[in-house]
Amino acid sequence: MRFRLRYLVVPLVLVALVAAVLWTIPADGYLFSPDRARPLAVHVQVPGAHPAGGGDVYYVDAFVRRASLLQRILPFTRPSGSSLIPADQYLPQGVSNRQRQQQVVSEMQRSTLIAPTVALRALGRRVQAQATGVLVIAVIGGYPAAGRLQEGDVVTAVDGKPVRTPPQLRAAIARHKPGERVRLTIRRGGKLVALTVGTIPTRGMPTQPFIGIQIDQAARIRLPVNVKIDIGSVGGPSAGLPFALEIARKLGRNVTHGCKVAATGELSLDGAVLPVGAVKQKTIGARRTGVDLFVVPAGENAATARANAHGLRILPVSSFQQALRALTTHPPKC
């Protein structure tokens, strides 16, 4: 019996050693895993606040970390509800981990300005906000824009026609065929610079031209009240919608009706709700937290949320104004 146990133990030890080694070797991919939804009440401060309706507005994030080789090979070793994302989909060529972290911090900072602008405007407050162009937040190595555009450039015109928002820039570039060149006017260091950039097909969409930049809204904003938003180390733009809903709640709009309302969605300066990533994980996180309603961007995000809702009510919206109207006129049930 002792002889047989020795032959059984040795293979098990070897398997454990191999697993331990594979766990320490990073794979070419990232794991997106669910996090819990968290209330915003203590993180958003608005002068003259008088919250209405009880309940809370929640934001939802996702854990992102480099996958190990073991997790790539054996899916059952990954956290429940996680997804393995190829490295180049999360971290484009030419963008380092440090640059990516700087991007998500900057995106969060911009969302803390855009969300109050959108919310206060919707509530009838006078806000001075002007879209000044399209901010380049990253230039992807190996693409036509590399060596031509720089992080911090602001695109103000395409082919001689003004552009002020990311959708306008995308539409202007989309008028070209892949392989054609695009004339851009950019603001760099206080000066206007004209340059020409080539295009290539977008991955998965061969007729869609791509120059190789990541973009955000550039704007001049002056708020009538000093809204303060701080959720610590959380980055990215996807908390814009819940920020705006919490500001509306603080200023007397009953968006919760005593319920737990979670939301995710990037906000543009005009109030449009833009798609975000990791919606599967955010839906699972909201569901596990026990919220009553999850407000998400309409379209593919909403379809993904519904596929992972398992009884959680999903409210798809295309704009903050639509979300505010839906929540105040059709109260969530809890």
Image (spheres, grey):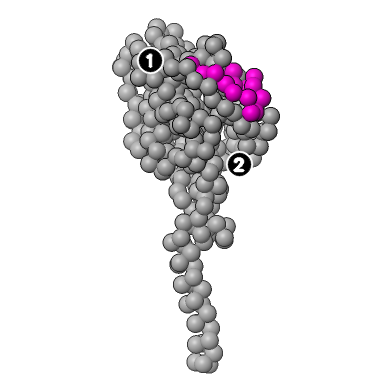
> Of the numbered discs in the image, which one, if any, rests on residue 191?
1
- The residue that appears at 59% across and 23% down in the rendered structure is 181
Q: Secondary structure at mark 1?
A: strand
Q: Quadrant of residue 144?
A: top right
Q: Amino acid at mark 1?
A: Lys
**Between 252 and 204, the one nearer to me in the picture:** 204
Q: In the figure, is residue 304 to the left or right of 104?
A: right
Mark closest to the chain's N terminus, 2 or 1: 1
Q: Secondary structure at mark 2?
A: loop
Magenta stretch bounds: 172-185
Marks 2 and 1, how far apart in space? Answer: 48 Å
- The residue that appears at 57% across and 60% down in the rendered structure is 73
Looking at the picture, how far across and down is residue 95, in whole percent?
45, 39
Q: Is residue 139 above or below residue 220?
A: below
Looking at the picture, how far across and down is residue 262, in whole percent?
49, 32
Q: Is residue 174 magenta?
A: yes
**Between 147 and 155, the one nearer to me in the picture:** 147
Q: Is residue 279 visible?
A: yes
The residue to which callout 2 is attached is: 308
- Circle 1 packing at 10 Å, graded few (<14), some (14-19), many (20+), is few
Q: Is residue 155 magenta?
A: no
- Circle 2 packing at 10 Å, graded few (<14), some (14-19), many (20+), is some
Q: Amino acid at mark 2?
A: Asn
Q: Is residue 333 visible?
A: no
